[in-house]
Image (cartoon, helix red, strand yellow):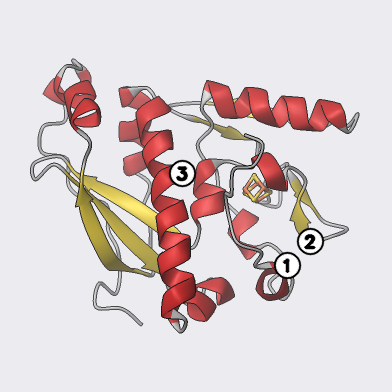
Amino acid sequence: MSGERRQDNFIETCERCHGRCCYEARPPLTRRRTRLILKHLDGRNSDAGFNVHVGRYSHPEELGDGYCVLFDRASGFCRVHPTKPETCVAGPVTFDIDWRRGVIEWYLKQEKICPLAGTIARDKVALARHLESAKQEILRLVEELEINELLAVLEVEEDDTFKIGENHLPQRILEKYLHSSTQEDTPARTPRSHMNPLGP
Ligand code: SF4
């Protein structure tokens, strides 16, 4: 992990928002990511409160007010920023998978729900850099999740996004899907809804 650039420094933009992306976020946790987060917290003698919700896919527990258990209210930032989950690093870029076409589609949230989305949408260089990093994070996540977990993640609706690109899925990910028994039950999964597909 050392030396890996996961995300540009967007602190200036993100500190104006106070963690809206950490509200009802439920970022998927792979086993590897959970271990990295625990190690990070352990290094700070601060594993208190990191509980994992285990359901159709695992994610950090959500508190009663809807905020992620890893959100630090005092600072307004993530307690595990260097090791936070892949979708948290990728945001405001998000994704969907079209299994029939064998592609992974990239979406950007609208500025009204994420100020950073507006910032990078207006700066083509920043968008290109962030998208490249987001793709690496998401592809690693997609590869590491069990197929049933991935299918559950893909059922989560992503409102207020617009498509910014797509890539062919790596063959090994397609094969994971094709070889799973789960796909027999979900051969024609309806793509999750992306409201306002034409953008902001
Ligand atoms: S892991 Fe961190 S960045 Fe992700 S939702 Fe939780 S507090 Fe926010």
Side of 185 where 56 appears, left or right? right
Q: Residue at x 10, y 38 (%)?
A: 188
- Cβ of mark 1 under 8 Å from ligand 1: the answer is no
Provide the secondary structure element on which disc 2 rests: loop
Badge 3 local density, few (<14 within 10 Å), some, or many (20+)?
A: some
Q: Residue at point 22% right, 51% down?
A: 167
Position above or below: 32 against 68: above
Whether residue 118 sits left or right of residue 66 in the image: it is left
Task: Give, as a three-letter code, the residue at label 3.
Answer: Glu
Residue 182 relative to residue 25: left or right: left
Residue positioned most to the front: 3
Rendering quarter of residue 33? top right
Cα–Cα gap, marks 2 and 1: 5 Å
- Amino acid under label 1? His
Of pointers 2 and 1, the one earlier in the residue sequence? 1
Residue located beneath label 3 in the image: 137
Q: Kindly identify the amino acid type of the residue bearing the numbered disc 2.
A: Gly
Do labels 2 and 1 touch, CB within 8 Å?
yes
Give the residue at mark 2: 76
Cα distance between the residues tagged 3 and 1: 23 Å
- What is the spatial separation of the Cα atoms under label 3 and label 2, in whole angstroms? 23 Å
Any part of residue 112 in sight: no
How many labels sit on residues?
3
Disc number for residue 18: 1
